[in-house]
Amino acid sequence: MAPTGLTLKRVFSAAFQIRTYSAPAERTIPAAKQKYVPTTGTYPKGFLAGTSHAGVKASNTSNDDITMVVSDQLCAAGGVFTKNIFKAAPVQASRRFLSQKENDNFRGVIVNSGCANAVTGKLGQEHAAIMARETDKCFEHTSTSNDIPQTLVMSTGVIGQRLPIDKITAAIPKAHQALGTTHEHWLNAAKAICTTDTFPKLISRTFTLPSHPNTTYSIAGMTKGAGMIHPNMATLLAIVCTDVKIEPSSINTLLRFATNRTFNCISIDGDTSTNDTVNLFANGMAAPEGTSALSLPPALLEKRSREHPFHSPRQDPPSPDAEAFTEVLTDFMRDLAKLVVRDGEGATKFVTIRVTSDLSHGVAKRAAVSIARSALVKTALYGKDANWGRILCAIGYAPGIMDAMELPAITRAPYPVAGAGAKQVVPERTSVSFIPTDGSAELKLLVRGEPETVDEERAKQILEMEDLEILVKLDDGPALSEYERDERVKEAIPRRKQHET
């Protein structure tokens, strides 16, 4: 039995260890975060949102925790999901539904917060399917175990606990009855998917396309996430809807491209969740009659959008409309992703890491992700310490940039791994700066491999700001000739055939 003094000490310690960055039970929004919550919105035609209270989490006695976002008519749908090996049941179910229906004829998505339905075995799979089928029933579509549901599924909350499925199935019809198109309906939906978020994350905007500029389209989306944020499918949940008409065969490629440049580029704590999901729904209800659906050439679909697909001379370019929409979608999802970072658990700064490279997007991203994940870089920024050497260090050990000759022994690859550091990053062409967000001049720290004399007081002023940009140029110096660039790229690519020979 513990001594009385020790017991009291533990009680007081527990009482004061309160996570002030977690959402209060009554979901009051901190004053500093109110500016990120929209008061109005313009939402895509034919999409509705509704919520209800199920009490998935026993401590939640009043807040809505079931969200339904659906289209008046069946639509194209795309999904990007977590790469975590322990994929949650709703992730597995939605991936299966999208594959079986080839991304077409979907109604929308049903979401519960409070329980992730992750690592819950076969029963978890059954519960995810039940949520989808119960939502289908609300639209007079009865699906059996042999049918493919028209509804995708998301869950978020505690991992390793089973869903109170009876509470959820009882609340789904109530969410359907509450469906509406107003800003209040959408904002309530954004609130109902929150867990440790301190504010609802919702954005909407309008845009046009080159072929018919007089038609106004809309795009709207909500996201949630404050923990388990890592640059690899880095959010918990995101739902994006648009009234543009998109070919089902192209919607996943468009979504992957946008996700790789937005949600896959943010980092807070280095964890990748079991439930990460981004869904895109497109019903085409704002498109004029006779308008063709946005589509991508077959060559672009095969690339899976890992690199920028729009400027290769060896393949047909997409239509101006497809290229314009991809830009709209990427910009939109980038702004959604930024809201996740601003609400990160324990986060005190919003840091943009911008890396340029004249070799490829992949090289720049490897360097940026390594900087973002570095605990030492984070501690320096938190401590307002302009220790920019930690930035260079993070670039130098980045996987794929660090000496490739050391990697095969670790990865057991049968051939050299892409990207020797001496080829992808040249110290003599590398520069680093802090870019203030108040519009004042950048503070140069390293210029083409040579350290600058840094004004420490000026550096501290910049680091005291809530927002900061770190600019890294891996291409600072004389531009590479086309021959030099091709030679460096060739040297950074694995030569499987040469090794086999």
Image (cartoon, helix red, strand yellow):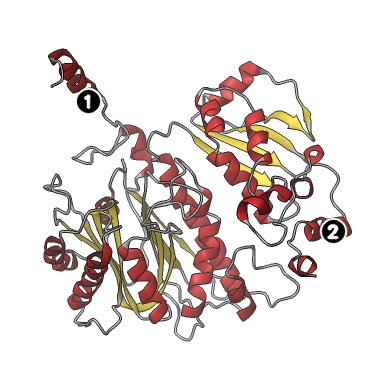
Tell whether 255 sits left or right of 95.
right
Q: For label 1, count other residues whose C-alpha is less than 10 Å away and answer few (under 14), some (14-19) or many (20+).
A: few
Q: Which residue occupies the foreground of this view, 54 or 405?
A: 405
Quadrant of the frame with the C terminus = bottom right
Q: Which mark is residue 249?
A: none
Q: Which mark is residue 14?
A: 1
Tell whether 202 sits left or right of 329.
left
**Residue 354 image point, x, y percent:** 62, 43
Quadrant of the frame with the N terminus = top left
Give the residue number, with chain letter if any, for mark 2: 487
Is the C-beta separation of discs 2 and 1 under 8 Å?
no
Residue 99's quadrant in the figure? bottom left
Query: Secondary structure under badge 2?
Result: helix
Q: Earlier in the sequence, mark 2 or mark 1?
A: 1
Query: Secondary structure under badge 1?
Result: helix
Q: What residue type is labelled 1?
A: Ala
**Residue at image x 28%, y 47%?**
195
Q: For label 2, count other residues whose C-alpha is less than 10 Å away and answer few (under 14), some (14-19) or many (20+).
A: few
**Residue 377 image point, x, y percent:** 56, 32
**Residue 131 image point, x, y percent:** 22, 69
**Residue 10 image point, x, y percent:** 20, 21
- Residue 255 visible? The answer is yes
Q: What residue type is labelled 2?
A: Glu
